[in-house]
Image (cartoon, rainbow, N blue to C red):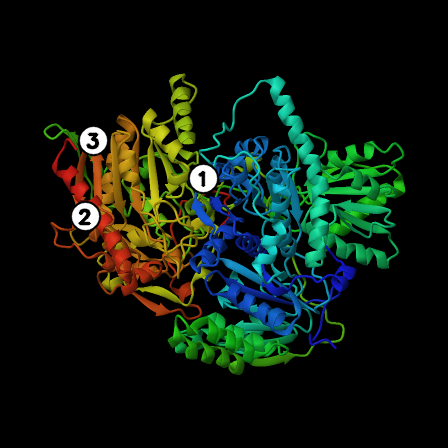
Amino acid sequence: MAILEDNLKTMKAAEQLTTFESGNEMAAMAAAQINYHIMGYFPITPSTEVAQYLDQMKARGEHDIKLIPADGEHGSAGICYGAAVTGARVFNATSANGLMYMLEQLPVQSGTRFPMVMNLVTRSISGPLDIRGDHSDLYFALNAGWVILTAKTPQAVYDMNILALKIAEHSKVRLPVIVAYDGFFTSHQKRKVNYFKDRKIVQKFVGECPTDYNFARDPKKPVTIGAHMNGDDLINNHYQQSEAMYAAGEVFKEVSEEYAKLSGRDYPVLDLYGMEDAEVALFLLNSAAETAKDTVDSLGKQGIKAGVISPNIIRPFPSEEIRKALKNVKALLIGERADSYGGHGPNLTHEVKSALQEDPENQTIVLSRVFGLGGKDFYADDAEAFFSAAIEAKEQGYAEKAFDYYGHIPGKKEQMLLPVITPQHGEVYNTGLIKTEKDPETNKLKVKIPPLRVLASKPKRIASGHGACPGCGIFTGLELFFKGIEGDIVVLFQTGCAYVTTTSYPYSSHKQTMIHNLFQNGAATLSGTLEAILELKERGEIEVSDDATFVMVTGDGGMDIGMGSAIGTALRNHKLIMLEYDNEGYMNTGSQLSYSTPKGHMTSTSNVGRTQKGKSFHHKDTAQIMASTNIPYVFTGSEAFPQDLIKKAAKAQWFAQNVGTVYGKILITCPLNWKSEERYGEKILEAAVNSCFFPLYEVEEGITTITYNPEEKNKRVQLPEWLKYMGKTKHLLKDENKMLLSELEEEIEYRWQRIKAKHEHPSL
Amino acid sequence: MSILPKTNELGFYEIRLESIGGLGANLAGKMLAEAGVLGLGLNGSNFSSYGSEKKGSPVKGFVRFCEADTEIRAHSPIEQPHVIGVFHEALYKMVNVVSGMEPEGILLVNSAREFDDIKQDLKLEYGTLAIVDALQIAVEEKTKVNTAMLGALFRICDFLDPESMKMVIRKTFEKKYPHLVEPNIRTFDRGFNEVKFKTYETPDNAEGKEFHRAAPQLGFETQEIGGVITAQANSILKDLSGSRQGFLPQFEQEQCINCAACDTVCPDFCFVWKEGEDKKGRKQMFLQGIDYQYCKGCLKCVEACPTSALSDMRETMGFADAHRVKQNFSLAAGGML
């Protein structure tokens, strides 16, 4: 970014204010000022904050954007597409596997030519899972047909978001646009930023929402959107799209120039630093380019002619400008935060090389390095090392190693991982004290368990030293459940707090085998593992005990995005257990609402303010949804009623070994995000059960039984007795929110009465 | 004329905050940075160490200040700060908090201990040590540690304006929590006034504390392919006692009825059991004590205990080590422990 001093002097630039904000905050601010119609989103680090900031502003009544929390990124892209076909202005933000999960939808959006703007807060894609930044997600978007702008600083994030919509809606373009900026480095670092005081300035700049296209908005003008084609037609459609993409490059220049006059900030196609006379140069995307500029300065003092090239737009790719910029450069190093495995260099290496190839006189030696993956920091000395490699190539006249990784280390043999404990399996976990058998009279399972004290002899499945917050309810819930399971287990943890806090490489807190998969797919994954082990056994290729129990562990978030996979697995009736720890929110990513968050509860995407009082719709009844798949056993449980939970675990094991799929939901506390005192974990859960918010019951081969009825025990309490423990529900106890509280109470009562009716009538 | 007392070669005055998640170091860093950038018109940047670390895990906060016309291009963590603020003494066990401290740097520590003790613990040879008992102030005022630390940091960064910070505190609380305004302003003032300094003379040829960029334990020749971990349960090697925020449970065996209620509610599996015989000669499990290496001080066990066998106490130096009962893990030969 260069300040256009002439413009500053001559233009009546619009009034701007200075603030100190991060990239995510500035993306949200631009969206709020534009006042988009719709944002369909799903939380994923590090982009989640964009939706959070917009929700905070919404609670204060600062914009009118309808924020729709989707069931996953695929759903969020669907919401956005569905909104875009009406000609509404649509906004989204995502990262990493969020982009991967919606990838299918990206070419749909661009190929049918409906503009929208999405912020891609770049992060490493799984696997292995890494929440920090690189460009591996961005590279999957290169072929999606979206215009891609790259923003190096929080200021650029704000500015590019304004440019993006104008480009997207331009009559020569009509394509969706991605604004890509570096996860954490740009998304989370606070910087001094200028923004327009009056949102009308922004709205005037982007202009009125175009209406001269074919939309699904007027019954008087019916249209068919998304007809299928054959190649004869498709090639013409794609030619149009290709032309539009190249046009976007020209439109970018126009719009950017116009914006410079308004803002005093100029975004040329290429950000060139020291390139006037550079003999060696680095080509870097986004934040790393900034770091390298400091190195250019220090090399300059040593008399070395060095420069940095960093594009502000990569789709369309600015080939011509790059060719010009590199005309006299002797050696160039292209540093990329992602690889194209097996391609002898990542994507942009080839795009730069192909740009140069069209200049027959070009003599630039090109080196390519993969660096900074998964958020690995890029320091000034790394930039120096890159320049040294380029200088060496220049002096030698060729590249010693054209393509390589940078920053990887071989490791030391003496630091290799060694087993710490002896493998824990089989008899270790077989107490012989838990008896489960079918009662021939009632045809129901009967379970005998010893006192808790006796079961203290049974070792835990999860090891101490995990990184959960103090007072976390996950592990007490899981271990109580595992206490009721005899023999070996094979567990799959879907992405979530339990997974993250027990598997921070190179540490594991699992004593038995643990498999992770992304949280829209755990149930399906474990069904594959289970069936493969059975098949291997069937063919005599492995010898394992008969009694291993397969457990898929998920949070309530995983049961949102992974609902399809869970239901599919249940319908196939694999012999495994799905165990959900429900803490009423996406706590691993910073307490966003889940569908299991009760109405009115505050989360980071259901804020409480003047115009909004927490979550707007009721909590999902996952146990009933799973019961209606007619699997043999469904239960609810809680740490506050340990014997009840252990018995249910024993039943779950019996059904998973003998009949088919089991689903169980354990309510657990999250002191951090419930804003409750750590020490009261058990009391809070007890109150949740006694208020009938969370009834303890089971559905055994279709028959519902309440296993603990607070009314019969004379323990029933009013809902506020539960809510009073938690900061996230404090507002519900205020007089002004009486109506909201009674709505929640009515829903809870209604659901409780239904469970009671089912308990009383076996055929319900 | 610069108001910044000193700057590095890129023109930055740099501050690093060392804390654990939950103590509010992140917010203190943000307030500090805003006071310089929005209050005084300096340029600056502020960020934290990133990751999925939960409450109680080590975190770092960073603040860079420079002149308004200096561009900030560096994104990387601060390695050689002018000021280091340590919010939590128990961090010494897990983190080298003084890493990269420059020779004339200032180290602020939240502590009730003496200068020379801290100097010895941190192997500090020179520089200025600043001590404030932020926890005590916060307990007395029923506020948070970070506000007291912020007061002390304002004293150290004397180019910042404490009065404008107090205005911010007032504005933050007065609407929703008016009763918290005065205690928080008192906390800030007390941090500002009660911080004590001692300078250890810096010889002319002094070099700063070397900064170590942590290398990973494994490399491409020693990682199992695919990132598979074969050392199950190796997290028992970790010491999580630094996650406690000043309190821990205390166990009195005489009062214990071995009901296992504590064991049921402990998220970190700290309770150590042993098989023995009861009065009638039957085999039974007996609670031996607490493995404080893993205890994060949530105190759920104290609430669950039906007798007075478990009670909470303010943690004192050395108590946990003296009273720790080690978990009896089945260790593998050759494993590290």
Secondary structure beneath dot 3 equals: loop
Q: x%, y% of residue A192?
A: 63, 63
Q: Chain of mark 3?
A: A
Secondary structure beneath dot 2 equals: loop
Q: Compare residues A649 and A605 and report the one nearer the observer.
A: A605
Q: Chain of mark 1?
A: A
Tell whether label 3 touches label 1 (CB within 8 Å).
Answer: no
Q: x%, y% of residue B16?
A: 60, 65
Q: Is residue A574 left or right of residue A647?
A: right
**What's the amino acid at mark 2?**
Arg
Q: Chain of mark 2?
A: B
| Sequence-first disc among 1 and 3 | 1
| Label ID, residue A72 | 1
**What's the amino acid at mark 1?**
Gly
Tell whether label 3 touches label 2 (CB within 8 Å).
Answer: no
Q: Determine if marks 1 and 3 fall on one subunit.
A: yes
Which of the 4 quarters of the picture holds residue A707? top left
Pair 2/3: label in front:
3
Q: Is residue A676 left or right of residue A93?
A: left
- Spatial separation of the CA atoms under disc 1 and disc 3: 30 Å
- Spatial separation of the CA atoms under disc 2 and disc 1: 55 Å
Query: What residue sits right under mark 3 in the picture?
Result: A702
Query: What residue sits right under mark 2 in the picture?
Result: B282
Q: Compare residues A228 and B180 and report the one nearer the observer.
A: A228
Q: Compare residues B77 and A239 and report the one nearer the observer.
A: A239
Pair 2/1: label in front:
1
Q: Is residue B281 left or right of residue A671?
A: left
Tell whether label 1 touches label 2 (CB within 8 Å).
Answer: no
**What's the amino acid at mark 3?**
Gly
Q: x%, y% of residue B238?
A: 48, 53
- Spatial separation of the CA atoms under disc 2 and disc 3: 42 Å
Q: Is residue A149 above or below residue A140?
A: below
